Amino acid sequence: MEVTVFNGSPRPRGNTSALVERIVEGLKAGGVGGRTVTLYDKDLRGCSNCGACQRGEVPGFCTMEDDMQDLYRTFLEADTVLIASPVYMWQLTPCALSFLNRLHALKAEGRDLMKGKGLALAVTMGDGSECADSAVMGIIDFCEYFGMDFLGMVRIPYAERGQILDGTHDERIGSFVDRLCAAVRSG
Ligand SMILES: Cc1cc2nc3c(=O)[nH]c(=O)nc-3n(C[C@H](O)[C@H](O)[C@H](O)COP(=O)(O)O)c2cc1C
C-alpha cells in the first residue's frame, strides 16, 4: 500500500515540499507508504502534439526521449498518485502540467492504462483557496476523462512553510490524509 507523490514545485524547501513532507508523515502513521518524485529537476518537455502516441506508433509511449520515459514507468507502477503543486497563475506549475499532458500517451486506441488508478491533489498558494479553483476543476475533469478515481484534495491558502510545519494547518492536512489512507486501504 503506497501513494506515489509527483511534486511539481521548483523549491525543494518551499511550501509545497513542506506539505508533501507532512502528508507522507501522515500516510506512514496511517500504515500507508509514501514515495516522492520531484518533477522540476527532470528533463520534462511539453507535449508537441505529434500524435504518434495516439496512433500507437511508439513502443515507449512518446517520441520524446526525455525523463518522461522513467516517469511513465513510475506512474504505471502506482495504484494511487498524489499530484502536489503550488498554484501559478491559477493553475498548476508548468512542469506539473507537462507531466499531466504527457500522460495522455497512456490512453489511446487499444490502451487505457490510467483507468482505475486513484488520484489526489495537494496545492499551496499565496492567496485564498479560491485561487486554485481552475486547477482543481482541471484535475477533476482529467480524472473523469482518464477513468481515474478522484480521491480528494487539500489546499493551503496564504501558504508559509513554517506554518505548514508547525501544525497551523494540521486539521486540514489530517482530514485529507485520513481520507486518503482510507481510500488506499479499501483498494
Ligand atoms: C510565477 C508564480 C505565480 C503564482 N501565481 C499564484 C496565483 O495565481 N495564485 C496564488 O494564490 N498564488 C500564486 N503564487 C504564489 C505561490 O502559489 C505560493 O507562494 C506557493 O505556496 C509557492 O509554493 P512553493 O514554495 O512550493 O514554490 C504564484 C507564485 C509564482 C512564483
Image (cartoon, grey):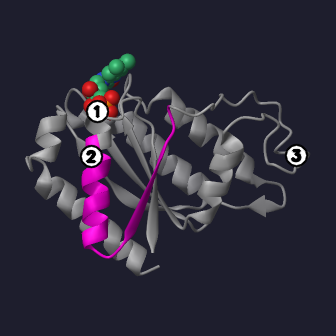
Query: On the image, numbered disc 2 is attached to which residue?
Result: 19
Q: Please identify the quadrant where the N terminus is shown.
A: bottom left
Say which residue appears at 19% left-offset and 61% top-offset: 174
Question: Cβ of disc 1 within 8 Å of ligand 1?
Answer: yes
Secondary structure beneath dot 2 equals helix
Residue at figure coordinates x 26%, y 43% from the top left: 18
Q: Nearer the viewer, mark 1 or mark 3?
A: 1
Left or right: where 45 falls relative to 30? right
Which mark identifies residue 58?
A: 3
Inspect the image, locate mark 3, and give the three-letter code of the amino acid beneath it: Val
Label 2: few (<14), some or many (≥20) within 10 Å? many
Q: Quadrant of ligand 1?
A: top left
Q: Residue 151 occupies which quadrant of the picture?
A: bottom left
Residue 164 position (above or below residue 93): below
Give the extent of the magenta segment: 18-40
State the image coordinates of residue 63 (x, y, percent, origin top left).
Answer: 83, 37
Q: Which amino acid type corresponds to the residue marked 2 in the rendered image?
A: Leu
Does the magenta-highlighted stretch encompass residue 31?
A: yes
Q: Going from the N terminus, do you reach mark 3 or mark 2 first?
A: 2
Residue at the right extreme, as displayed: 57
Residue at image point 67% right, 41% down: 68
Residue designated by label 1: 14
* Residue type marked 1: Gly
